[in-house]
Image (spheres, helix red, strand yellow):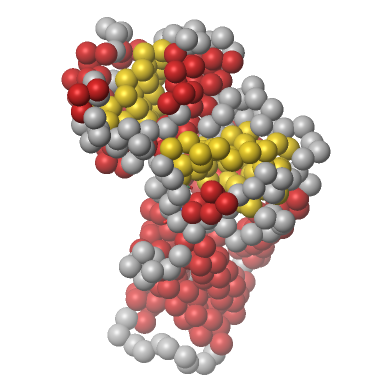
Amino acid sequence: MSNKTKLVIFLVVCVALTLTPVTIMLLNANWVWPMRDISVALAFLGMTIVGMQFLPISRIPWLADSIQLDKMYKTHHVISAVSVGLILLHPIILVAGQSMFFEEPFWLQAGEIALFGLILIAITSIFRKQLKISYTTWLLLHDIFTLCIMVFGLWHMFGRNYYMRNSAMTATWIVLIVIWGGLALYIRLIRPLILAKHPYKIEKVVPEGKDTYSVYLLPDGFERPAFKAGQVAWISRGPSPFVISRNPFSYSGSTEWDAVRFSIKKAGDFTNTVSDWKPGEKMYVDGPYGTFDLDDPRMQKGLVLLGGGIGIAPIMSILNTMADKGDKRPVYVFYGDFNEETVLFEDEFENLKSRLNMTFIQVLEKPLNPEACEHKGFITKELLVETLPENYKELFYFMCGPLPMMDAMHKHLGAMGVPKSQIATEKYEMA
Ligand SMILES: Cc1cc2nc3c(=O)[nH]c(=O)nc-3n(C[C@H](O)[C@H](O)[C@H](O)COP(=O)(O)OP(=O)(O)OC[C@H]3O[C@@H](n4cnc5c(N)ncnc54)[C@H](O)[C@@H]3O)c2cc1C
């Protein structure tokens, strides 16, 4: 089954599940008090959307190569905001102007608690950095608030028992609860149990440049799962895979090597420790995920790979894999970094040049030795146009780097008339 078909099936099922309760409700509403019916319809829709957020979409193996992670995160943010709005409208429409805090009966209080959870999740998500909440703490709070919204929201709905008396409605919500609960159980219990049986051991940790280290991992007692160049995995370190947070990293090595390699730049709590990681230590790799696929028909005429800083990591996986497979497609690499001290994979690039049909352009923002640097500043539209062949609109573009760089590249490619369908991005700053 193609990736697109899987995605379409998944989306159709999600939309159908989301719309079922509100459709049943609207079909059974008596419209004696339309404002009440509308407010309840909005809340039903909001609750099913909140429930859908339980779906660990990025970690469902069947969908692993069909979902673009950055698009998924963006969609998650948008639909979360929509669900908050819909649920908030419910009490506003229903009891506008009345105080409704901590009154009897409990089903009403349960609704209020769910609302507080909803408001807290919105505040801590939008203002996480200003509130100085670490990412791991935020993930934990996010899970607690989501659970609170679901438990007390459902308590409110079943406790009020107005529209829920309808047996089709009750059955639908039970099905939804089973699906959401099952998926939450899968991601929190079953997936870690599976990972526990597939530990990796650190083979070596190699410094690559300023603050960046490549970590080579070997599977400990099982066959290494295949992955595709350009994909990512969530990794964790330590004796157990039962952790609150795993961190996402691109595979940076060849698909043909025995070890998997991740190249990690120090950026915070987890990554700052990478220089202390020791050979033999246990790690867990949850992956692969992501849609990049060198066999994609759109990529057959050649590739343009645009990397900035640590965004060069997935590009190294693509290049090493192509070299190991004797892939002679034309490939144009534009690698932007700060200066000679921050550049990564210098020796590896030298080695790859002779093994690939590759044009390699390195651009340094502020070189320490400007005379010896051919391309200074940023990757510009002019540089792209003068380097790329005439048929550049037929090539496939992959970019990964800091957000301002990606925005600039999108602008250049748009101005050059490269179709959007020929461009893929990997964003590292999406959570
Ligand atoms: C798809 C993807 C691929 C990536 N590939 C690489 C790579 O190959 N090499 C590399 O050096 N970096 C990569 N990153 C960035 C890397 O994941 C973060 O730098 C790292 O997780 C930061 O964690 P920390 O605890 O050290 O820092 P913190 O200070 O705790 O976090 C810094 C920021 O990193 C992000 N982050 C932290 N944990 C997670 C998480 N579990 N899920 C999503 N985002 C998180 C958050 O935006 C957070 O604000 C990638 C990110 C994404 C989303």
- Decide: is 312 above or below 404: above
Tell me if 293 is positioned left or right of 216 in this view. left
Name the one closer to the observer, 302 or 421: 302
Examine the rendered structure and indicate whether residue 107 appears above or below residue 286: below
Q: Residue at x 77, y 40 (%)?
A: 220
Residue plotted at (30% across, 85% down): 97
Residue 416 % position (x, y) = 22, 20
Residue 49 percent location from the top left of the image = 49, 57
Residue found at the very far right of the displayed protein: 221
Query: Which part of the image, by quadrant, shows the N terminus?
Result: top right
Regarding residue 71, the answer to whether it shows in the image is: no
User: Where 63 falls versus 355 (above or below)?
Assistant: below
Q: Return the residue nearer the eye: 394 or 387.
A: 387
Relative horizontal placement of residue 16, taking residue 362 as reference (left or right): right
Residue at 59% in and 34% down = 261
Judge whether residue 138 can be spotted in this image.
Answer: yes
